[in-house]
Amino acid sequence: MADSLKVIAMLTMLVDHIGFVFFPEQIIWRIIGRLAFPLFAWGIVQGYNKTASLKRYVLRLLTAALVSQIPYVMLFGVRELNIIFTLLWGLIVVHVWERFSPLLALLLCLPAERFMSYGIFGVFLILLMHVWQDNKNRLVMGVLAATIAYVVFKRVPVQIFCVLALPLILNFQWSVSLPKYFAYLFYPGHLIALIVIRGLLSRL
């Protein structure tokens, strides 16, 4: 994943979480935030293609996921696993699709519904992006269909705005360079920062 898309993914995620915590009545924050997950999902697809060591890639994601889980629960008050676990599981499903069995990969999407943020939709979106990454038309139609299904079955209308990430995925050209582990540190770091800020504001 180009670092430029990582920056956009992190910023839109930050906007989403600020809105959720501090301005829950203002929908615009959540709309902007819908761009984040598709960009991170695309990043997993590109990371799988480019990584020199899948084991080290998995270990980095797992470490970030574990470090982030307690702040995630504290900030959002949920019991599900945080989004990095979803990305990690998506990476594993992609590998199973490529090295073992497409049917097994599809079956492995199912457990995500019970335990992970974005559920089946999140993991399946990563797999879909991987399978159709070289066919723009199928990629667009697949993301649209998966998003509509999520909106209908989960009754989360705001999620439809995640399709706005598609033009960025397909055409974005801006270039920027980030430190190697910045994105892994940003996720738990911004959760902790929001917890601290919320705590300070509650004392005013």
Image: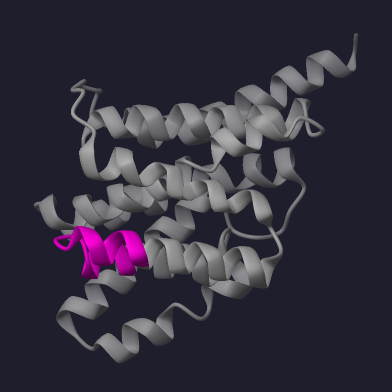
User: Percent position (x, y) of residue 89?
Assistant: 40, 66
Q: Is residue 188 magenta?
A: no
Q: Quadrant of residue 76?
A: top right
Q: How many numbered badges does the structure rendering display?
A: 0
Can residue 1 be seen in the rendering of this structure? no
Direction from residue 70 to residue 188 in the image, left or right = left
User: Percent position (x, y) of residue 59?
Assistant: 31, 54
Q: Nearer the viewer, residue 84 or 144?
A: 144
Q: Quadrant of the N terminus?
A: top left
- On screen, residue 118 above or below 175: below
Colour mapping used in the image: one colour
Q: Quadrant of the C terminus?
A: top right
Image point (77%, 22%), residue name: 198
Q: Nearer the viewer, residue 95 or 6?
A: 6
User: Percent position (x, y) of residue 137?
Assistant: 24, 62
Q: Which residues are magenta?
A: 128-141
Can residue 75 be seen in the rendering of this structure? yes
Image point (83%, 14%), residue name: 201
- On screen, residue 124 above or below 77: below
Q: Nearer the viewer, residue 96 or 164?
A: 164
- On screen, residue 162 above or below 86: above
Chief secondary structure of the magenta portion: helix
User: Percent position (x, y) of residue 72?
Assistant: 64, 43
Image point (47%, 41%), residue name: 35
